[in-house]
Image (cartoon, rainbow, N blue to C red):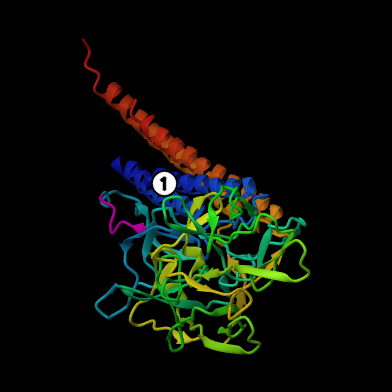
Amino acid sequence: MRALQTAATGMMAQELNVEVISNNIANMRTTGYKRQRAEFQDLLYEQLSRVGTQTSQSGTILPAGIELGSGVKTAGTPRIMTQGSLLPTSNTFDVAIRGEGMFQVLLPDGRTAYTRDGSFSLDAQGRIVTAQGYVVQPGLTIPQNATSTTISPQGQVQVTLPNSNTTTQVGQLPLTLFVNKAGLQAIGDNLYLETPASGPPQNGTPALEGFGDLQQGNLEQANVEAVSEISDLIGAQRAYEMNAKVITAADQMLQATSSLSR
Amino acid sequence: MENSLLVGLSRQVSLGRELEAVANNIANLNTTGFKADGTLFEEYMMPLARENAFAGSDRRVSFVRDRATWHDLSPGPLMQTGNPLDVAVGGNNFLVVQTPAGERYTRNGAFQIGPTGELVTSDGDKVLGDGGPIQFQSTDNKVHIAEDGTVSVREGANSNVDTPRGKLRVVSFANPSALQKDGSSRFLTTPNNQPQAATQVHVTQGALEKSNVKAVVEMTRMIEITRTYTQVAGILQQQSDLRRSSIEKLAEVPA
């Protein structure tokens, strides 16, 4: 009985759905987290009698055939890259991106990763690093004796040195755009890698031509909406239960058949 | 004598098929743009009963057979997602996608932007506009899809004019029930049922059409199927018992 397998695909799909939802809820308070959504599609159909085939010599055709579906599959778990709300922290090295773009981070293995998590700090050499200690490109060094640091919406990092009443520009934080940012590969630690699906990175200056601007002293919160996640969770749980019921029904029918031959 | 067994069997086979359709509907309870399937049965009259030489009227034996599955094309509920690349189409209209096997039609509007900047489905198939695929540039942002399907963007952050990027091709069918399901939320059509440009286009951005499977209806159908199946099995059991006892009694050889 194929209904057993069909219902099993439904249960597996809902299990994956719950996994995606639980990851979203677990990351509700993760800075720069972008929620995922499980996308489902129906599986292939078996055509037991094809629609439009001739039913007589005089050319009458079958108006509706017999198609039996074989269940559901997961098409993907695309990331919804909408803007998260900004949370003021008044921390000097907390930077949020308002609009499009990602920061570039140099990984220890030499690759470049991209992130929307702007909770930066300084390392022992005065470089701007991420929470994991990876250097934020292009590797700006803040002088040890700087009294204050300002990051402008355009990404210019300026410091005030002692006994000076003017600011000195240390450098510029660039941003990177991708044509298909949903195609980036997440590697954890709020970092993403470029893939063939994302398209090549395009670097540029914040607040110019399609790039967002930088907001110092703010962090971008996750774009997870608790209400919609919970309602999705309820929907997934009920759908799982119903698929389990189908398996019970198919089992009962098989039992009725097998009890015939006693 | 065998007739009652075979009539019962024909019902059981058709119930098995119906449960498969119900199982597929329930498995696709959360599939975007999914359309539920229903089953149709018809009576199959045996041409002539065999024992028609008896005096008195003999009734023709009727079997059941599954004749067709049909698609319930009623619209599913809209779910607001807020994602600018999610699109729901109203009415009985379809969006057109270009697959390697040719044009397919879908109501699943969970679109994305492909690596080369085209609007694609989650399978990577290009979504067709009136003039071919809809192509975005790398500096495009604020994608806006109007109610008539026109896709417009702002070129660059400082732009405040909408630049059109094409118009989603929305089609309808004279006989939508003749569409075939192709899997992956897609439909394909037959040569004598060609798509026409839809007259009443209503495209909603930031929303998805959920599956139109009505869970309660499917559950009741499923209960009905299991109960009927068990009842038919009971009839078959009685027939079998009847035959066994007749064999035992009639062919009892006194020792």
Determine whether the residue tagged by mark 1 lies in a helix, strand or loop: helix
Residue B156 coordinates in the image, percent (x, y): 58, 82
* Residue receiving disc 1: A3
Quadrant containing the C terminus of chain A is top left
Q: Is residue B179 visible?
A: no
Q: Residue at x 39, y 32 (%)?
A: B237
| Residue furthest front in the image | A163
How packed mark 1 is, by other alpha carbons closer than 10 Å (few <14, some 14-19, many 20 or more), is many
* Disc 1 chain ID: A
For residue B66, what is the image quadrant? bottom left
**Above or below for A189 versus B90:** above
Magenta stretch: dominant secondary structure: loop
Q: Position of residue A57 (x, y in %)?
A: 24, 77
Judge by depth and name the residue closer to the eye, A183 or B101: A183
Q: Is residue A258 magenta?
A: no
Relative horizontal placement of residue A191, taking residue A169 as reference (left or right): left
Q: Position of residue B144 (x, y in %)?
A: 61, 80
Reply above or below: B211 against B17.
below
Q: Residue furthest top?
A: B255
Amino acid at dot 1: Ala
Q: How many marks?
A: 1
> Where on the picture, by quarter, is residue A75?
bottom left
In x, y percent, where is residue A143? 64, 58
Q: Which residues are magenta?
A: B44-50
Q: Tell me if A183 is positioned left or right of B162 in this view.
A: left
Against B12, residue A53 (above or below) is below
Front one among A135 and A125: A125
The N terminus of chain A, quarter of image: top left
Camera-nearest residue between B44 and A247: A247
Residue found at x 33% / y 74%: A52
